[in-house]
Amino acid sequence: MKNKLFAILAVVCLVSVVTTGCDKGPKKVPITGTVMVGDELVETGSITFDPVDGQGPSDGARILNGQFEAEVTTGEKRVKAYGSKVVGQVEMDPVLNPGVMSNKYEDFPAKVFQEEITVKIEKKNQVVEIKYSGNGPAK
């Protein structure tokens, strides 16, 4: 009986020591949003959220159909995005799949995304709208 009690006590102590030392780092929350340049959606690309103060991790996500979903640490973030827009249709493979069309993409000019945008991530399920002017950074 003493051995069984000792074993249970040892397991409880071990679990409490291990879990006390397990800090999962800064709090991350799920967010969603859209990315636009002027009045055009960034159809496909990537977006990152860097801490303005330089402390902590950067977080990012893919942009698909102008939208993104990400797990981001809370706080003030500097946004960086890159992406493309749909500019028409092209035939995918005229030999194997004649008549099957696909979107044709064109990258937005890199200068567009040099405009500085910051957002404050405060809560779970926050919706973030990112809109670049389309003119590049302010002079």
Image (cartoon, grey):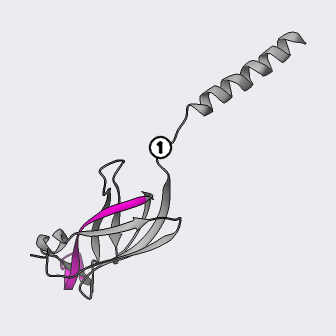
Q: Which residue bears the numbered disc 1?
A: 25
Residue at position x 61%, y 32% from top? 20
56 or 68, which lies in front?
A: 56
Q: Amino acid at mark 1?
A: Gly
Relative side of 27 to 3, left or right: left
Magenta residues span: 75-98
Return the x and y of residue 38 as percentages of the image width and height: 23, 86
Q: Main secondary structure of the magenta part?
A: strand
Residue at the farthest left position: 139
Q: Position of residue 13 (x, y in %)?
A: 70, 23
Front in this rendered view, residue 11 or 90: 11
Residue count near mark 1 (Cα–Cα under 10 Å), binned few <14, some 14–19, many ≥20 = few
Image vertical order of residue 64 relative to residue 29, above or below: below
Q: Is residue 90 magenta?
A: yes
| Quarter of the rendering containing residue 114 | bottom left
Secondary structure beneath label 1: loop
Foreground pick, 105 / 53: 53
Judged from this view, the residue extending furthest toward the right is 1
- Screen quadrant of the C terminus: bottom left
Count of all numbered marks drawn on residues in the image: 1
Residue 23, position in %: x, y? 53, 38
